[in-house]
Image (cartoon, rainbow, N blue to C red):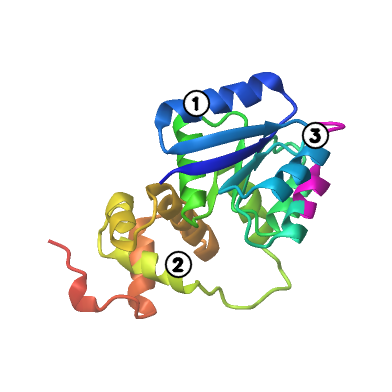
Amino acid sequence: MSLSILHANSNVLMSLGLKSLLAKGGGVDSVLNVTHETQLFQALEDANYDVIVVDPNSKGHFSTDTILKLREQSKTQKLLVISSTANTTDVLRVLEKGIEGYLTRECDTDEIIHAIFAIAKGEKFYCNKVMDIILNKQYNPDEDNCEPTTLTQRESEITALIAKGMTNKNIAEQLHLSPHTVHTHRKNILRKLGINSVSELTMYALNVGLIASESFRID
């Protein structure tokens, strides 16, 4: 895979750092840096990019509205935000538009590289801090809500595999996902169901018929 990246960031050190980082890993054909919103949209008129990496908290250069404009312009353009999560309202505004990835500035080298390549392949990639914001928003207990908890098809599939004793790595290989994506689903499932252990998850899988009783054995 040879990727073309558009990096929207007004901080010179950040832009040079990402370019140097991606050059070392291989698989990235080009990285174009733009420092203002006008330049960003001009660059998109001139060429296509596999992933746009943007910091919306760049006063006078890029903002949350920049992300919203990007999504309005194209529903399919893959976007990765690397920014602060201090303002959870702005984080959620961005995520509600289906942004493919969100990392904090504290994420390490491997996580940034992994995120870019995972997003380019069509996966979602959020760091743990961002996942906590998503889960707190989506699954905060509501006393007036008596609707039963339901899992998505992918969540049910992963639940069954976890209940059968498979590791995140094994599940990732079988489903052609990244281990990080499986980890994210796993954390999401446990939070959604309100359980804290694999044994509880296994009992859930048995009770709802995700796995057959004969496939679960205690030696």
Give left or right: position of 179 versus 46: left
Cβ–Cβ under 8 Å for marks 2 and 3: no
Q: Which residue is mark 2?
A: 155
> Crowdedness of circle 3 by 10 Å Cα count: few (<14), some, many (20+)?
some
Give left or right: position of 179 versus 31: left
Can residue 140 be spotted in the picture? no
Can residue 103 be spotted in the picture? yes
Residue most toward the right?
Answer: 60
Cβ–Cβ under 8 Å for marks 1 and 3: no
Q: Earlier in the sequence, mark 2 or mark 3?
A: 3
Q: Amino acid at mark 3?
A: His
> Crowdedness of circle 2 by 10 Å Cα count: few (<14), some, many (20+)?
some
Q: Secondary structure at mark 1?
A: helix
Cβ–Cβ under 8 Å for marks 1 and 2: no
Q: Amino acid at mark 1?
A: Leu
Q: Which residue is mark 3?
A: 36
Q: Earlier in the sequence, mark 1 or mark 2?
A: 1
Q: Secondary structure at mark 2?
A: helix
Q: Is residue 216 above or below residue 64?
A: below
The residue under the point 57% across, 34% down is 31
> Crowdedness of circle 1 by 10 Å Cα count: few (<14), some, many (20+)?
some
- Image quarter where the C terminus lies is bottom left
Residue 101 within the segment the image draws in magenta: no
Disc ID at residue 21: 1
